[in-house]
Amino acid sequence: MKTIDNIPTSKIQRATKLVSTGAKVGVNYLKYYGDKIVKTPEEAKERLNKNNASDIYDGLKQLKGSALKVAQMLSMEKSILPQAYVEKFSLAQFSVPPLSPPLVIKTFKKYFGKHPDELFDTFNATSVNAASIGQVHIATKNGKKLAVKIQYPGVAESIASDLAMVKPVAMSMFNIKGKDSDKYFKEVEYKLVEETNYILEVQQSKEISKACAHINNLKFPEYYEDLSSERIITMDYMHGEHLSEFAAHNTDTEKAHKLGQALWDFYMYQIHNLKKVHADPHPGNFLISEKGELIALDFGCMKSIPQEFYTPYFELARPENINNNAYFVEKLHELEILRDDDSEAEKTFFTSMFHEMLSLFTQPFHQETFDFSDATFFGKIAELGERYSKSTDLKKMNGNRGSKHFIYINRTFFGLYNLMFDLKAENIKINNYLRLS
């Protein structure tokens, strides 16, 4: 893969890159208007989506950082974005052009004050994995193989300006209006700032590893604080296959069940016992070992769950509460889904919409075991998301609703459900985490 010798770091450089990307999107729309004359509307729209997704991703991968991270987050929202965007943006999980070896050495010296050869017995300046915020290199020390994650230059400093440039697109995509919409963007900015603090990530990684060490078939790398800094993390190199790659060829249903149960228990234990959760559940953050164990990586994005959100959120996972209209409406207000300034039409629409969504999405919690390999269940979720994404009634209403905590908690559950489906995990014991308490 072609490497990158420099990354735009100033506001002007990054804004210029986005403007040039916007110009390409403009050209794509001109092509689209021409295509509508000679092609069917569906064919014209599909070509527009593919061209736009490709050009936007190509621009973001040069910028890296928070702009690319947002694309990665959106790729997990499979029911919101057209498939062309999902396919392209999901590349941000694994396939991003890495920094060139000379830039790696320069960056390492800037962040650590030393050449990597002064810290490690060996250090490979060619990356083995590049993502949105940093890339990974292999090193050795005292006979141990290590993974060294180095943050891209300028990422932490450009978060606020990057999000300011992305904000108008996101507001249009999710139909967000109103003066208090900033709470959502501040939540994303706050979490992205946390993700660039590698000292915090090492601390969180060690805490979660210790707290969840007793969960069966789950493994974590060891982290080395003396070989880490604010922008560099050194950990054990873990041998394994990315979860999605494993799932693509696995035919062992017993192994799929074992891994699925470990993954589900890991998340339920964090959410219900720790009230803090690994909120970045994409396939690139999980490996499958040769022994068939689940290896969890990358604890930069941890979401704390306040009790005032946790209680009503999980009360609405119970069918008796969903079907008690007065109680249901009360909880929607507590979760800021219904607003005091809503019109009667908005109250009726959003109460009905969330009743339908929660009745479907919470089905795994309504039974002792659940089959996450059930394509029908996931097909219904996709159909529901597609239907509401095209709803003309919804587009007329203010999409600015719901607690800010929904952003990362919903992201966690969408990601977790997709991973469970990828594994084709059957007969998962939903409340098995209670045995682990």
Image: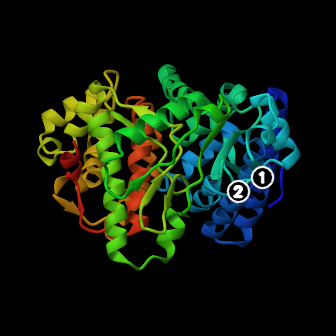
Taking depth in this image into account, of 232 and 385 the one nearest to the observer is 232
> Can you give x and y, in whole percent of width and height, for residue 430 in the image?
22, 55
Taking depth in this image into account, of 256 and 371 the one nearest to the observer is 256
Contact, CB < 8 Å: mark 1 with mark 2?
Answer: yes
Residue, disc 1: 124
Residue 52 placement: quadrant? bottom right
Q: Amino acid at mark 2?
A: Val
Residue shown at 48% from the left, 20% from the top: 180
Q: Secondary structure at mark 1?
A: loop
Residue 387 placement, left or right of 32: left
Residue, disc 2: 128
Up the image or down, 229 lies above or below 282; here it is above
> Can you give x and y, in whole percent of width and height, for residue 321 in the image?
14, 41
Q: Nearer the viewer, mark 1 or mark 2?
A: 1
Residue 177 placement, left or right of 348: right
Q: Is residue 397 visible?
A: no
